[in-house]
Amino acid sequence: MKWSGDLEWLEAEAAEDPTFDPPALRERPELWPHLAFVSAAFSELSTDRPIGAMGGCGPIPWTAIAGYAERYGLDDLDEFERFGRLIRAQDRIYLADVAKKLERKGK
């Protein structure tokens, strides 16, 4: 999550310069193919989270998760529950990272 916005730039630099070998690119985690849908969903659902006045943000609302699941046909209860757990797990990590950044800034 921390460097994913720079991935395209890093890959382009590495393609142009074979000596360019930053740790962020070399050590990046691999996303298992069966989690690609959940990863893309998390990115989209993050746009639905409430933002606080002090720069913090809240968790992705359950209604957004349920709406996304319905839109993409996750109508099996077990499938939906798994999807929700995976989104919530990513969300907890994201929110903890945001809280640490705000704490360092003194907010």
Image (spheres, rainbow, N blue to C red):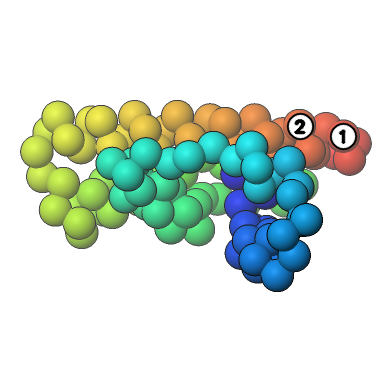
**Extreme-left residue of the structure:** 76
User: Label 1, label 2: how many angstroms apart (C-alpha)?
Assistant: 6 Å
Q: Where does residue 44 sit, x and y in percent of width and height?
A: 43, 58
Q: Secondary structure at mark 2?
A: helix
Q: Is residue 52 left or right of residue 79?
A: right
Q: Where does residue 74 sit, x and y in percent of width and height?
A: 16, 46
Query: Label 1 crowding class (10 Å Cα cut-off): few <14, some 14-19, many 20+?
Result: few
Query: In what quadrant of the picture does the C terminus appear?
Result: top right
Q: Residue visible at 69% across and 39% down?
A: 98
Q: Identify the residue under disc 2.
A: 100
In the image, 2 versus 27, the foreground residue is: 27
Q: Eyeballing the image, is 96 above or below 59?
A: above
Q: Residue visible at 64% across and 30% down?
A: 96
The picture quadrant where one finds residue 77 is: top left
Q: Residue visible at 48% across and 40% down?
A: 30
Q: Residue visible at 28% across and 54% down?
A: 68
- Say which amino acid is labelled 2: Lys
Q: Where does residue 20 sit, x and y in percent of width and height?
A: 77, 56
Q: Which mark is residue 104?
A: 1
Q: Where does residue 85 sit, x and y in percent of width and height?
A: 34, 29
The picture quadrant where one finds residue 35 is: top left
